[in-house]
Amino acid sequence: MPLSPAPAIETRELRKQFGRIVALTGLTMTVRRGEVFGFLGPNGAGKTTAVKLLLGLSAPTAGEGRVLGAPLGDLATRQRIGYLPELFRYQGWMTAREVLALHCELARLPRSGWPAEINEALELVGLADRSNDRVETFSKGMQQRLGLGVALLGEPDLVVLDEPTSALDPVGRQDVRAIIGVLRARGATVFLNSHLLTEVERVCDRVAIVDRGRVVAELGMAELLRDNGVRVLVTGLPDVEAIAGRFGQTRLDGEWLVVDSIADEAVPALVAELVARGGAVHAVVPARHTLEERFLSLLAAAPDAGRRDGAADIAPDAGRRDEAADTAPDGPARDTAPDGPAPGAGRDTGPDTAPDAAAPGSQEARP
Amino acid sequence: MNRGAILVIARLALREAFRRRLLWALVGLTLLMVVVTGWLFGKAAELNPLEGGERQLILSQLLVMIAFMFSFVLTMTAAFAASPAIGPEIENGLLLAVLARPVRRSDVLLGRWLGLALVVVGYALAAGYMELAVAQLMTGYVPVDPMVAPFYLAGESLILLTLALVFSTRIAPVASGSIAVVGFGLAWMGGIAGGIGDYLNNDALRNAGTIAHLILPSDTLWRGAMYALEPPPDVLAAAGSQARIFTVSPFFAGTPPPLPWLAWCAVWIAATLAIGILLLRRREL
């Protein structure tokens, strides 16, 4: 029986100190092979520092870690890792194709395979028709796409994406989700460092929430968001809360009846009771926490939570998700983009005359 | 050390020099310099009524002055090409993507040094030989060691290139370039002080020159270039007392640099690069 491969990432009490400033107190986490792993935390939590330690770009002050079974910083292992830095720039005087060729060479990929690797990466990130343009003419969003292309070269076993959607518009973000889907299908492990909680919620299998340099929670997304509750759209029952009260804690959320802490097997009985009392049941959906709610509650529960001021910096892009709107017609809320059309398909990445000037969301010319 | 990665980074530096038109600017400057100095040599040859050793001495001084200007241009080029080579690439994230590959920090530093050194040395040799050819064509003057002089100038620029590159691992490009240029000036002054010390048999001045040559040996190589551009010893001997006025000039070197001092230049470059690697390794990205 073959030995199971080592975890993609494994760290134990990894610590990083810059002078008197402790960026990471003691990072302990495990990322399994083939999963999409979200790495979350407020600004200043040490996320980017952790990424740099994992990639050998910075040396830990204490602790240990292994990436793809090798010690941190192992040179040969870096051939199997793709990386999109958070703050990055590529040689502006080179074309997109030349940048990709440079990284093929730096990654020591066989020269005969370069054209196919480069073309595939360009297609995947939607830059095929800008491949011979200089990078300095690219908007920030297009540079981020190029960065993604660089990270995908050589079919890496581990892809580390540090804020991959920070400069992208909604279409670009959907493309990134699709690319992560492609990587998942290839069996690659994706380590996603992002403060856009909706993105993480949509694509990740598991997450670690890090606060002041320590993992405060590491668990599966389903487990993280599970609420043991149900939301029922019911009309014709003025005293609906009282009727449903024996099934669990109830409250009204607009037209929706929310029943918390109800066992799954009790849901049919609840619906039968509401119908029997003359109510019209229009929809029944499982209630879930949003990632943002769970994120904030986990941070609030962490020791010394009152001393933190960074949690408010997390992008409030998730808000309280209206589960019914997301899930009632088609079922689960999990984004299905990875199975959708090829990312970047039909994209017009035509002349972009405002290099580096475009704000997120305005960087690509689109039909 | 990873030779493959060093060569990739060196090639990248060369391509950047071409693409960013650094080389074309240098070629343009060289052509301009050749035209101007060619005219100058032509006039010197026409108007000079002197014969023999004194004529040779005057032409050699003219050539040394032009070489001094050229060495200054070379130094500036080396310092300002190297001073933004590392620091800004760390700050703008360019090196993050490179160093996440199987590339060591030492590979980046040595690769950048090699690429820029090829640009600067190539330019020094091409422009230097072209200038010597123009001088010979216009005046017939052939210095004592014309083939070696451009190598000394190239070596001098390598010293400053190395200094600016190593400083660029830690400080801003403007500061790094400025330090290299000021260092060039101080080393030159130190060399002059040492020369005066030799002439006056003054130990303090002589030691100042020696210390300057130890700390930054660019002047050692400049003095080698001067010597190589001077007339052959027999011409100087024939000029007799007329030559004496030139021998006390700061633009005159009576002897070529001793071999140990040339070896020190090579050691200095290697040691400074080693310090640069250490500084870069310790820098947080």
Image (cartoon, grey):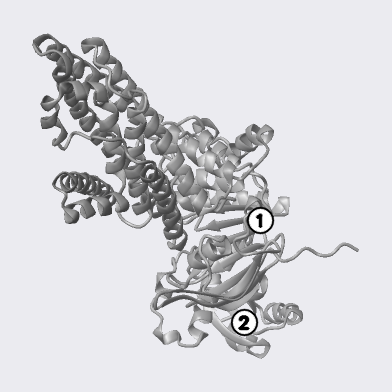
Residue plotted at (47% across, 33% down): A95
Looking at this view, is B196 or A2 the one in front? B196
B154 with respect to A319 (left or right): left
* Mark 1 → mark 2, Cα distance in angstroms: 50 Å
| Marking on residue A259 | 2
Judge by depth and name the residue closer to the eye, A132 or A309.
A132
Q: B11 left or right of B71?
A: right
Residue type pointed to by label 1: Thr
Asked which secondary structure carries label 1, the reply is helix
Q: Residue furthest right?
A: A1
Residue under the image location 40 percent in, 70 percent down:
A313
Rate crowding at label 1 as few (under 14), some (14 to 19) or many (20 or more) other CA atoms within 10 Å. some
Q: Position of residue B144 (x, y in %)?
A: 30, 23
Residue B73 shows in this picture: yes
For mark 1, what is the residue? Answer: A77
| Mark 2: few/some/many CA within 10 Å (<14, 14-19, 20+) | many
Foreground: B211 or A52? B211
Parent chain of label 1:
A
